Amino acid sequence: MKQGELDMTTLPDELDLLILPRWIVPVVPSGIVLEHHALAVHQGRIIALLPAAQTNELNVRERRELPDHLVIPGLINAHGHAAMSLLRGLADDLPLMTWLTDHIWPAEGRWVNADFVRLGTDLAIAEMLRGGTTCFADMYFHPEVAAAAAMDAGIRAQLAFPVIDNPIPGARDATEAIAKGLKLHDETRHNELISVAFGPHAPYTVGDETLTRVRTLADELDLPIHMHIHETAFEVEESVRLTGMRPLQRLQKLGLLSPRLQAVHVTQINDQDLALLSEHGVQVIHCPESNMKLASGAMPVQRLLGAQVNVALGTDGAASNNDLDMLGEMRSAAFLAKLTAGDPTALDAHAALHMATLAGARALGLAEETGSLEVGKAADITAIDFSGLAQQPVYEPVSQLLYTCSAAQVSDVWVAGKQKLRDGKLCSLDTGPILQQASALATRIRQGDTHES
Amino acid sequence: MKQGELDMTTLPDELDLLILPRWIVPVVPSGIVLEHHALAVHQGRIIALLPAAQTNELNVRERRELPDHLVIPGLINAHGHAAMSLLRGLADDLPLMTWLTDHIWPAEGRWVNADFVRLGTDLAIAEMLRGGTTCFADMYFHPEVAAAAAMDAGIRAQLAFPVIDNPIPGARDATEAIAKGLKLHDETRHNELISVAFGPHAPYTVGDETLTRVRTLADELDLPIHMHIHETAFEVEESVRLTGMRPLQRLQKLGLLSPRLQAVHVTQINDQDLALLSEHGVQVIHCPESNMKLASGAMPVQRLLGAQVNVALGTDGAASNNDLDMLGEMRSAAFLAKLTAGDPTALDAHAALHMATLAGARALGLAEETGSLEVGKAADITAIDFSGLAQQPVYEPVSQLLYTCSAAQVSDVWVAGKQKLRDGKLCSLDTGPILQQASALATRIRQGDTHES
């Protein structure tokens, strides 16, 4: 397929970057694969997508040839707890409550502070950039520290500041958490890469009064709300027992259901829940690997998509996944969708890629800026090397991406036109000290964890 | 944990190889992780497993230090169709019958010959060795060609020769297929790496008469029988409709249920089926990714393990997976087992590793030879590098292996003491020509496939 002819008069005298891969999947228009095309990037934005044959005359600062590569929009990890990478594998294969109460919560209570969040977020950002993620939604303590880490790394991020009716690291109560969160929003509002959201943890940890306050402020400030919702059957049953309502019903009553609500997990829904999500245009975020690993259940993705609900994709934190590999997560999403629907055509390769890119941008309110390779959008770009044994031969590049690629095949990444990964190596982050400190801290945590349990 | 002191008098004057990793998981004894131990290899066999501190005095030809690595038994891919790697991604996200009748079968009918099998098997073997697999069970046309490829590469393999009541590439009918298969058995019986099995395709493609012949010959020659069984609900329903029996009942009636039967897929079982599998000691082989991708269903792994059934793991062919990555398959198996059982403790990290190693060896009748790192067994060994971003920090090495590692992290592989992979690079296979030929053939196949559909 050919794009229209290029109007040379609109191009700058010297272009910043021209990327020349074997294939480009722009995600918009949907379902197409461009072969032997080039992506022109200038001042951080995509300014043209044109046949490679038309680029010989262009005056270009950098010409990046990627002859065996597929180029896609940067991946968007729509849910996670970045700093929890430091607790990766601390305690696996356990029942949810044992895992939380005997391991994760004690470890967090004892170890989480601003330094922990900085180190863990640095580790997570390095892993995410290495795996082709250019934007991530985070929900963890000390969000101002995570925001600083994202800014330093130059990765796009939505920081959801946690709101819980209990003291948490960095905030004595919900009031302080909200005040600090709004301060962060204020301080970062002119940063192109950073956005801030309310992060009420879950229906069962935040009461009506706080949720009403969150709703009022979010409406007033036009900010998203990021929340774990209907993660487990137990959560839904307990809500019915205690309030007479399913969590989504209660959130509707409190006025929280709207396109600014980002509902994470949603493994348990009945027809009424589905109707609520669809009618109110709620953003839904799918974390298939976390849901399977914790045996929470399977989101009925096909039913949600069939009801026109926007479904984005997230890895969840590394303590419950245990990696931040969005390509692996896409594959798990496709496998699980087919199994759940009993239909091998469910969540095909293009649909899975859409979920991991444009749907993520939409969910985070960033679709004007990122999520597809369209002229005018930020140059958030990921390239995947198809020259490996498991990627050959290639019949359908997007199918190959979905069913054979993981973080290891990602070769190049740009965020807003700045190169972050080149030939599989991080360009600016020095991971040596991060890994060393993470390992040293883990040794102390492991000793503490063993000692206490 | 400490192994017993080493009796130096039993060691050779000069040892072939000493592997010194950070961690060793021998699989037997079950559940243990040895830290700072060494594996001593001589004349292709494991001759000692001892504390690293005791190895300084040893006279060793090669000392392989792997300071950030986990060493495990070589992975055993207990089901696949190696040569189908050439059809990887030819047609995905389609209903099973559309996929088979409109794409796979026409492509096979037109393109499969001995050259195709050699090239495809070479490609598959390279990918498997790259990913830590030291033994694979294959079931495809021209098994003598696949056997030659395995012998040339020095990888352990069980070749199941296909038996179907129809003409197939390489055999006009079941009689010729059996004759050729037994000839292959005869020719390879003294090869330490190669074993041969009967490969009746599935209950619905092989009639009672042929199955009875297979059973009789397999009993007489003490050979395994490798067969797709209860892959889909449709298969089971059709069998009931046509014969009044579920496939496993019919196989019992024909005398095929025994420990020499390797039943692949088994996504659909009722209590009676489970009892049959358990009572007769049938080997069961799980292909979770293929089953999910084709929406065939989910094997109830916990119920099978609870009934003392041996459950091995396989990738299936790359046309329905689409890679041969056993570490990824282990992870999918764990995710799916937890989801299916509704229990996050199901198929924990050690159980998943057991499934991918010793259970595979047992299923293929090779447990005396491989599947664990025990003194006396062949030195089939895989090392995984844990220095990457997604592998750090490390609390539990086996958990980290299961939940964060894929083929890309495999660094070193030995089969029967011979090094096949070193620092992620294949030692003896030249993959350049394989990839080039595979790509050229795929171009022709794609044109043919598009043309015909």
Image (cartoon, coloured by chain):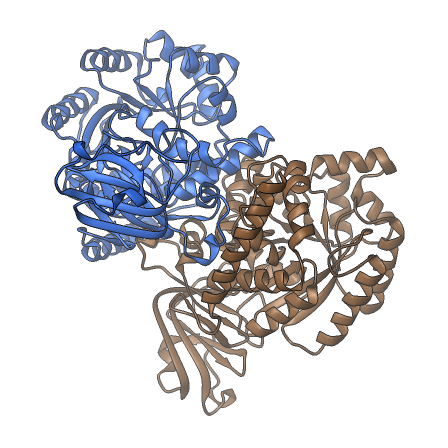
Chain colours: A blue, B brown
- Residue at (44% x, 81% y) in the render: B17
Residue B191, image quadrant: bottom right
Residue A99, image quadrant: top left
Q: Relative to the observer, which residue lies in front, A412 or B360?
A: A412
Residue B248: x percent and y percent? 79, 45
Let me know if residue B222 appears in the view.
Answer: no
Residue A94, image quadrant: top left
Residue B252: x percent and y percent? 84, 49
Residue B392: x percent and y percent? 31, 53
Residue B142: x percent and y percent? 70, 63
Q: Relative to the observer, which residue lies in front, B426 or A170?
A: B426
Image quarter where the C terminus of chain B lies is top right
Figure label count = 0
Q: Relative to the observer, which residue lies in front, B132 or A373?
A: A373
Horizontal side, residue A311 vs residue B310: left or right: left
- Residue at (11% x, 27% y) in the render: A190
Image quarter where the N terminus of chain B lies is bottom left
- Residue at (44% x, 56% y) in the render: B398
Q: Looking at the image, which residue sits at the far bottom? A: B13
Let me know if residue B344 appears in the view.
Answer: yes
Work out whether A141 lies above or below A92: above
Work out whether A195 lies above or below A125: above
